[in-house]
Image (tube, rainbow, N blue to C red):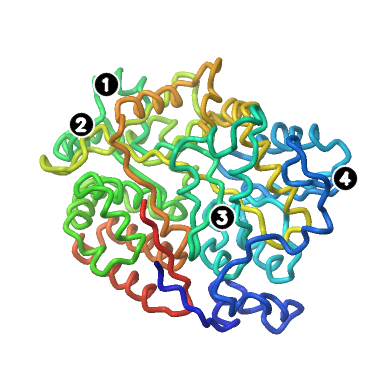
Amino acid sequence: MTNTPREITRRQMLRRVGLTALVAGPAAGLLSSCATSGGPEAAPTTAASTAAAVSASNPFGVKADAPLEVVIFKGGYSDEYATQSHEPLYKKAFPSATIKHQGIQTIGQTLTPRFASGDVPDVVNNSGTDALDGGALIGAGQLLDLTPLFEAPSVDDPAKKVKDIIVPGTIESGLGGDPAKPYTLNYVYTAYGLWYDSALFEKEGWTPPKTFEEFKTFAEAAKAKDIVPFAYAGKNASYYAYWMILISAAKIGGNEILLNIDNLVDGAWNNDAIKQSAAAWAEIGKYMDKSYEGLIHTEVQTQQNQGKIALYPSGSWLEAEQAKDTPAEFKYAVAPTPSVTAADKMPYEAVRAAAAEGFVVPSKAKNAQGGLEYLRQMLSKQGAKDFTERTKSLTVVIGATEGLTLSPGLQSVADMQTAAGQNVVTFSTFEGWYKELETELRKQTNALMFGRISAEEFATKMQAAADKTKNDSSITKQTRNV
């Protein structure tokens, strides 16, 4: 199914995980048992040390007093949802357990040495700009297969398995390896689009553009009001912009465009849909000041809150992330990306809505059973409801918003998803599978959007990067079918 190399040197794998510099140090024994196996481990090596009796309320056999270590990416959602909701739920189930919590932004920088030494946390929210290379970790046998989680009885109704109380596509979004298994729980059901202040738009008599011709007309109107029509942060969030490019490409040519990119299909980046989308967005990029390439996301988002920017590309975490800096009169709303051509395969209403924000359990965790249980508690209705209340973001748990009053932004997301119906742009998995390819895409997106390369050059450079990834035998290749 894939081009997974069956013989891979230890040094090559270390390079993929980002641990080459540590080879000669205390971690010299890392992966000695699995780096040449060609496949990931299926179970934690420390199972016996933490095992207890299995029951309906303790399906993984968590030892009641086993310590649990949780590392959370402290980004747009902060980490209070963990400390004030999910961790208390775990403590309620296991009162004798102590929980060590760490909320950080540098996930990769902080945890890479720990994976090298074998001293890993029990649960990791692997997210943010500095995320761990998930594909490399899977290939190195460093992540636990989460199949037991999805097959376990749910917290709220033991008659239903966890897999039956989450939205379709959640498990598939976390697949990896060969054969493909779920190594990541993507917890947040996220919608992506163009965010704006509905109060400002109502005041000016504007409506979000539905085509790129309308986009350019709108851009001129916003510019006349001394408002930047569209902007993103080039310094650390160029992926916000490449999401829009990929969404538009899928609208033009269908979801097959994105599947081919994920699967490193020859010529995938040179498809006309990619070029047409890149050209359309490059035209919008001309309305941005060059200074935005040097700003971080919160700086650009604050400018939007100040009425200086009209449209901003992001996901449905934005409203919560900016809560402390958003004026009372500012009302978040979101719109789909405009149609590029009259012949687009997907309508304007189509949106990218997918499970995101990944959580993993390291295979060598001291309390891997506790890690699985922590994720199960997250997937309870109480855990999901608390998350939505604190972050203004939906989870993958079905029915968890019952009885909640949604914020303006979240209500807008719900309305957009209703309008989209079955017209959903699929997720992209290369972002987690091939870290170097994703890094190159950030670079070339900035070059495109800030006018240094053409759409044709963008496609050519990205195809070259994809070919390099495909031809690198040290990189574990992965394949998706859905």
In primary-sequence order, the first of circles 2 and 1 is 1
Q: Which residue is mark 4?
A: 65
Q: Which residue is labeled 1 in the image?
A: 204
Are dots 3 and 2 in contact, CB under 8 Å?
no
**Which residue is found at the position 34% from the left and 43% from the top?**
231
Which residue was labeled with disc 3?
A: 183
Q: Are marks 4 and 1 in contact (CB under 8 Å)?
A: no
Please name the amino acid that badge 3 sits on. Answer: Tyr
Where is residue 149? Give x, y as percent.
Answer: 63, 45
- What percent of the width, then of the height, locates residue 136? 54, 68
Query: Amino acid type of disc 4?
Result: Asp
> Residue 32: which quarter of the image?
bottom right
Name the residue at 63% across, 30% down: 159
Marks 3 and 1, how far apart in space?
A: 47 Å
Residue 302 in view, yes or no: no
Which of marks 3 and 4 precedes in the sequence? Answer: 4
Three-letter amino acid code of the residue under disc 1: Glu
**Dot 2 corresponds to which residue?**
221
Depicted 280 relative to depicted 453: above or below: above
Q: Please tell me whether mark 4 or mark 1 is closer to you in this view.
A: 4
Percent of width and height locating residue 471: 37, 78
Tell me, yes or no, whether the two marked residues, 4 and 3, touch with CB atoms within 8 Å: no
Q: Secondary structure at mark 1?
A: helix
Earlier along the polypeptide chain: callout 3 or callout 1? 3
Q: Secondary structure at mark 2?
A: helix
120 with respect to 324 (left or right): right
Considering only order in the chain, which callout, 2 or 3, is on the residue closer to the N terminus?
A: 3
| Mark 4 crowd level (few <14, some 14–19, many ≥20, 10 Å Cα) | few
